Image (cartoon, rainbow, N blue to C red):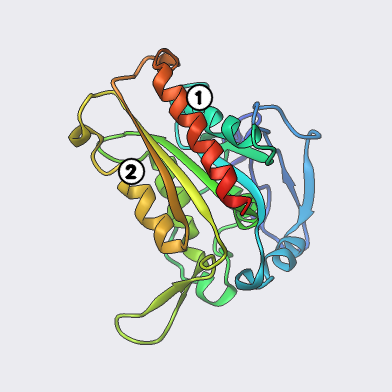
């Protein structure tokens, strides 16, 4: 069976999937929060992934740690810097963190196959998200940061959030009632949006597009950060009040996930 991605499309250092035959090996190249590869590569089989993900997420107790995702395609830009400052606030309170730039992962948007309703995880696509699901499940805290693209979150962040659809359960009524298997586990989140313009209207749906899906999944949004008037790469560093606020949000998140 052919790989999901053409080999020529695999950028160096990005998370990728090399095959979908259940008997073949799957090789991941995993960038850490600094963009370096962790131990060159980690090998796992599709069968191992299925065994891992067949756990009942409802009965899992996430760990007191924080996972952060930047939705910006610009490495080292304002979103990455804000994310790092939020996570600094977490680590200052002695809680572990991990982070990833979504642009460093190769994954597709949800294709609406609905296989996740039966399998309770996304099995219709086996790609970079297959590596991210365990990280999301195991972390009690979540941080999402996205710049505003056309009054909304970036395409990377939108595809990421859509792929969290696999955590919903549905009944057979019309319209179907639903619940989240991540709910009632004490999960907390911080969201942040970055906009070049200076008005809330120009930021559009950026925060809403992160807040509402996370709340539906069962996360309590304990803090939000809006950043206006920055576009130049790393320009947000000049806003000392923003850096302080970001660190404070991380500190608050750490205290709440530790309770």
- Asked if residue 57 is positioned above or below residue 95 in the image, the reply reads below
Marks 1 and 2: in contact by CB < 8 Å? no
Between the C-alphas of marks 2 and 1, the distance is 18 Å
Image quadrant in which you'd find residue 147: top left
Question: Which residue is depicted at the point 40% across and 47% down?
Answer: 158
- Asked if residue 244 is positioned above or below residue 100 in the image, the reply reads above
Question: Which residue is depicted at the point 42% across and 42% down?
Answer: 191
Frontmost residue, 241 versus 21: 241
As drawn, is 113 to the left or to the right of 65?
A: left
Frontmost residue, 34 versus 84: 84
The residue to which callout 2 is attached is 207
- Asked if residue 229 is positioned above or below residue 135 in the image, the reply reads above
**Residue pushed farthest bottom?**
173
Frontmost residue, 18 versus 161: 161
| Whether residue 102 can be seen here | no
Q: Which mark is residue 35?
A: none
Q: Which mark is residue 81?
A: 1
Could you say where residue 45 lies in the image, as x and y percent from the top left?
A: 77, 57
Among numbered discs 2 and 1, the one appearing first in the sequence: 1
**In which quadrant will I find the C terminus?**
bottom right
| Whether residue 97 can be seen here | yes
Question: Which residue is depicted at the point 54% across and 64% down?
Answer: 124
Could you say where residue 203 lies in the image, as x and y percent from the top left?
A: 25, 35
Judging from the image, what secondary structure is the residue with disc 2 in? loop
As drawn, is 197 to the left or to the right of 124?
A: left
Neighbour tally class for label 2: few under 14, some 14-19, many 20 plus, Cα within 10 Å: many
Judging from the image, what secondary structure is the residue with disc 1 in? helix
Frontmost residue, 14 versus 193: 193
Image quadrant in which you'd find residue 157: top left
**In which quadrant will I find the N terminus?**
bottom right
């Amino acid at each position: 069976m052919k790989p999901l991605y053409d080999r020529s499309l695999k950028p160096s250092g990005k998370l990728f999937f090399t095959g979908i035959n259940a008997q073949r090996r799957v090789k991941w190249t995993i960038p850490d929060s600094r963009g370096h590869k962790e131990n060159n590569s980690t090998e796992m089989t599709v069968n191992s992934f299925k065994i891992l993900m067949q756990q009942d997420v409802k009965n899992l107790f996430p760990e007191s740690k924080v996972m952060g995702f930047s939705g910006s395609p610009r490495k080292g830009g304002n979103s990455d810097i804000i994310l790092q400052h939020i996570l600094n606030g977490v680590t200052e309170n002695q809680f572990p963190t991990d982070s990833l730039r979504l642009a460093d992962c190769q994954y597709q948007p949800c294709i609406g196959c609905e296989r996740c309703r039966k399998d309770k995880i996304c099995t219709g696509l086996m790609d970079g998200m297959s590596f991210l699901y365990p990280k999301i499940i195991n972390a009690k805290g979540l941080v999402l940061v996205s710049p505003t693209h056309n009054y909304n979150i970036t395409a990377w962040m939108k595809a990421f959030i859509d792929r969290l659809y696999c955590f919903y359960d549905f009944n057979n009524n019309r319209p179907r009632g639903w619940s989240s298997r991540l709910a009632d586990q004490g999960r907390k989140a911080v969201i942040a949006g970055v906009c070049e313009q200076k008005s809330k209207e120009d930021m559009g749906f950026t925060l809403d597009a992160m807040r509402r899906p996370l709340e539906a999944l069962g996360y309590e949004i304990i803090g939000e950060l809006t950043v206006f008037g920055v576009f130049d790469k790393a320009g947000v560093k000049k806003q000392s009040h923003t850096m302080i606020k970001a660190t404070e949000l991380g500190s608050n998140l750490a205290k709440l996930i530790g309770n």
